[in-house]
């Protein structure tokens, strides 16, 4: 899995920039807000849900290039750790931490969510920004996250989901192109409850992320020739196809983006 993300990093950047997640527009009709600005706003929105303060520790699961962990650590004074299966992402995130002067408070390492390299009760909050859809075994992932959270620690999951009642067959081509599994918020709630998480709350934000779809198609069109030169024509064409499909699913409401919050079991 790590090799897949190492290989596709340039393609994701061509479509979404250096923050490979949706943006959040307070007003989806405000065309003055760029995708990059909206992506930072998304970090702020999910960061608020973690309730972090300077005395606490955050685990960013599937941290990408580390932008969320770095932004939240800078804003709150908290310590943060980020993990990803991509060595390229971790190398980039580590360099970004040093450049930002945050290497003493923010660290990154290559690790699988199913085998986190931390002692029990190491973190006050866990953040999963559009990473959980990539987990091969979601139950094993939640079990590990629960283990490293303090009692009643907070889990904040912002992810791409399938809308309730959507035809699963609509995801067939996406599943052929990328190793993901999109489930409903109801299924996530059930998985969380089965692992002892409590106070599960779901916030549907798909209306606020909708401008992402047009923005990623425009970015990819602008960057297409350069991307094809760097990674080849066939992978570039596959990325175009993936972006068109997911954009259509998002515009139609088949694909949803939601924030799910929960607390680990109390002591």
Image (cartoon, rainbow, N blue to C red):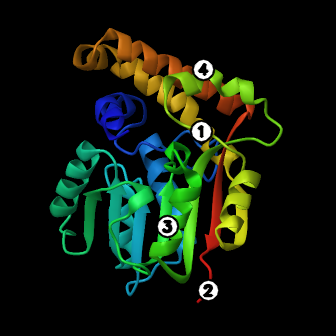
Q: CA distance from mark 3 to mark 4?
A: 30 Å
**Are the residues at dot 3 and dot 1 in contact (C-beta closer than 8 Å)?**
no
Q: Callout 1: 10 Å neighbours few (<14), some, many (20+)?
A: some
Q: Residue at x 34, y 58 (%)?
A: 83
With respect to residue 71, does 17 lie above or below? Answer: above
Q: Secondary structure at mark 3?
A: helix
Q: Is residue 207 visible?
A: yes
User: Of marks 4 and 2, which one's residue comes earlier in the chain?
Assistant: 4
Q: Residues within 10 Å of mark 4 (few under 14, many from 20)?
A: few
**Which residue appears at 27% of the width and 19% of the height?**
231
- Residue position for label 2: 266
Q: Which mark is residue 145?
A: 3
Q: Tag 1, which secondary structure?
A: loop
Disc 2 to disc 1: CB gap under 8 Å: no
- Depicted 240 relative to depicted 247: above or below: above
Horizontal and vertical percent position of residue 250? 66, 33
Badge 1 is on which residue?
181
Image spot of residue 210 (x, y percent): 63, 38
């Amino acid at each position: 899995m790590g090799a897949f993300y190492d290989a596709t990093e340039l393609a994701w950047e061509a479509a979404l920039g250096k923050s490979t997640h949706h943006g959040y527009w307070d007003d989806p009709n405000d065309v003055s807000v760029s995708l990059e600005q909206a992506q930072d706003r998304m970090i702020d929105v999910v960061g608020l849900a973690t309730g972090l303060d300077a005395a606490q520790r955050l685990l960013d699961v599937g941290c990408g290039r580390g932008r969320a962990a770095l932004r939240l650590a800078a804003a709150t004074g908290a310590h943060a750790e980020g993990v990803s299966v991509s060595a390229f992402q971790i190398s980039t995130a580590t360099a970004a931490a040093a450049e930002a002067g945050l290497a003493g408070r923010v660290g990154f390492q290559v690790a699988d969510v199913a085998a986190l390299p931390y002692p029990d009760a190491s973190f006050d909050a866990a953040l999963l920004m559009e990473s959980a859809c990539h987990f091969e075994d979601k139950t094993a992932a939640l079990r590990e996250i629960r283990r490293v959270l303090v009692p009643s620690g907070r889990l904040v999951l912002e992810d791409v989901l399938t809308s309730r009642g959507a035809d699963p067959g609509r995801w067939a081509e996406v599943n052929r192109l990328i190793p993901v599994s999109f489930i409903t918020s109801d299924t996530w709630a059930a998985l969380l409850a089965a692992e002892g998480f409590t106070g599960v709350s779901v916030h549907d934000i798909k209306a606020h992320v909708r401008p992402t779809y047009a923005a990623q198609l425009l970015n990819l069109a602008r960057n297409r020739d350069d991307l094809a030169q760097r990674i080849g024509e066939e992978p570039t064409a596959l990325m175009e196809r993936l972006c068109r499909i997911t954009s259509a699913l998002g515009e139609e409401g088949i694909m949803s983006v939601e924030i799910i919050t929960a607390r680990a079991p109390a002591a």
